[in-house]
Image (spheres, rainbow, N blue to C red):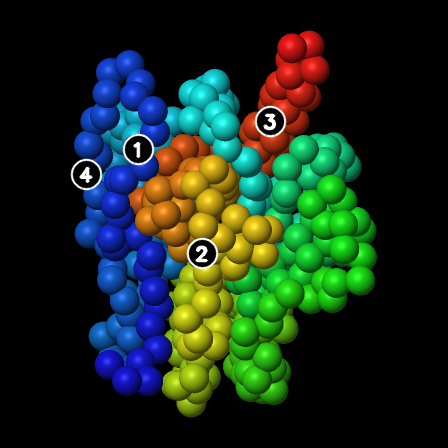
Amino acid sequence: MTQQQNVVVAAEDIKRAQKPPAIPGGYIPIPRRSVLKSLEINGPERINAWLDSMRASSPTHPKSSSTPSQISQDHSSWILNHPSALDMFDQIMDASKGKKIVMFLDYDGTLSPIVDDPDRAFMSDSMRKTVRKLARCFPTAIVTGRCRDKVYNFVRLAELYYAGSHGMDIKGPTRTSKYNKDTKADPVLFQPAAQFLPLIDEVYQQLVEKTKSTPGARVENNKFCVSVHFRCVEEKEWSELAQQVRSVLKKYPKLRLSQGRKVLEIRPTIKWDKGKALEFLLESLGFANCSDVFPVYIGDDRTDEDAFKKLRDRGQGLGILVSKFPKDTNASYSLQEPTEVMDFLQRLVDWKKESLRARSRV
Ligand SMILES: [Mg+2]
């Protein structure tokens, strides 16, 4: 298994340690697709496995073989296991009682809609206002596969923590807040893969060249990782694109491939992911060994599963998956789309204000 580059499909060892609070009707187990454990870059039979994995993490429509009643049954079963965080808001707040809430938010597909051009994945003004209010109530971090500078240009809130490149580029707030009073501190907190920068540049150039012939393919340099977006590539071209990416990666055993929603992501083989970034940020915020912290992580794709799993393993807080379709996930709750995320964040702000008012009345 040395120097093996794998597509890591994170859902293989789903544990249900942190089930959502009991809901009427209880849990209905849903049949889980057999999930691909890992996909080698070398090996002739593997491209179909890549494709299956790309389709599983980027559903473009409900499974065509399912009848409408099966689709609705699958969805109802899934919702029972992963209820709406809006519907369960009061129960979630009860679970956080006496604990300090820390917020972790993915960007694409969570705070901004998935759009055809990743450079135009803008966040709405109302979402920005909501996140600003949220950051006044709770320490808040953006955790994204994107380059940190790029996501900062979308979000433009200096009071947040930013973990770019899947957490490989972490920076604290540049504007002081009640969670960050030390203005002299270096805001760059951690860059565990700094020595990979030249290699990432090189592979970026090669992927741009190699994927030129696939209409709609888009390669993005995210500083510590490279993303190959296929949101504008027709599904019949996905196989060709997977072949092209594989042919480049064969030459780079120090890089590995993971995947998100409509994106293939190339990263250093170091053991670092959004889950590790979450843990690092909790430690930076002074919650290293605290039992009274309640981290909430909201995200929409495979790479967020590392963070959901980390929360399950720690037995703290909870994960919320943003998805309209049933998906295998380590998250406990769901929200359908960014507008629901905004509603949930606003309710958190309202809840915090109300609890402060209630305390001042005592
Ligand atoms: Mg996302």
The amino acid type, in three-letter code, at marker 4 is Pro
Q: Earlier in the sequence, mark 3 or mark 4?
A: 4
Q: Are marks 4 and 1 in contact (CB under 8 Å)?
A: no
Mark on residue 112?
Answer: none
| Category of crowding for the residue at label 3, using alpha-carbon neighbours closer than 10 angstroms: few (below 14), some (14–19), many (at least 20) | some
The secondary element bearing badge 4 is classed as: loop
Residue in the image at 47% along x and 37% along y:
292
The secondary element bearing badge 3 is classed as: helix
The amino acid type, in three-letter code, at marker 3 is Leu
Q: Nearer the viewer, residue 148 or 159?
A: 159
Mark 3 sits near ligand 1, with its Cβ under 8 Å away? no
How far, Cα to Cα, is label 1 from label 3? Answer: 21 Å
Residue hosting label 3:
348
Q: Quadrant of residue 112?
A: top right
Residue hosting label 2:
275
Mark on residue 19?
Answer: 1
Q: Is residue 198 left or right of residue 62?
A: right
Q: x and y percent of residue 357 in the render?
A: 69, 15
Q: Nearer the viewer, residue 221 or 131?
A: 131
The amino acid type, in three-letter code, at marker 2 is Gly
Q: x and y percent of residue 128 in the render?
A: 73, 39
Residue hosting label 4:
31
| Category of crowding for the residue at label 2, using alpha-carbon neighbours closer than 10 angstroms: few (below 14), some (14–19), many (at least 20) | many
Residue in the image at 38% along x and 59% along y:
54
Q: x and y percent of residue 59 in the render?
A: 40, 47
Q: Earlier in the sequence, mark 2 or mark 4?
A: 4
Q: Nearer the viewer, mark 2 or mark 4?
A: 2
Q: Pick the quarter of the image with the N terminus.
A: bottom left
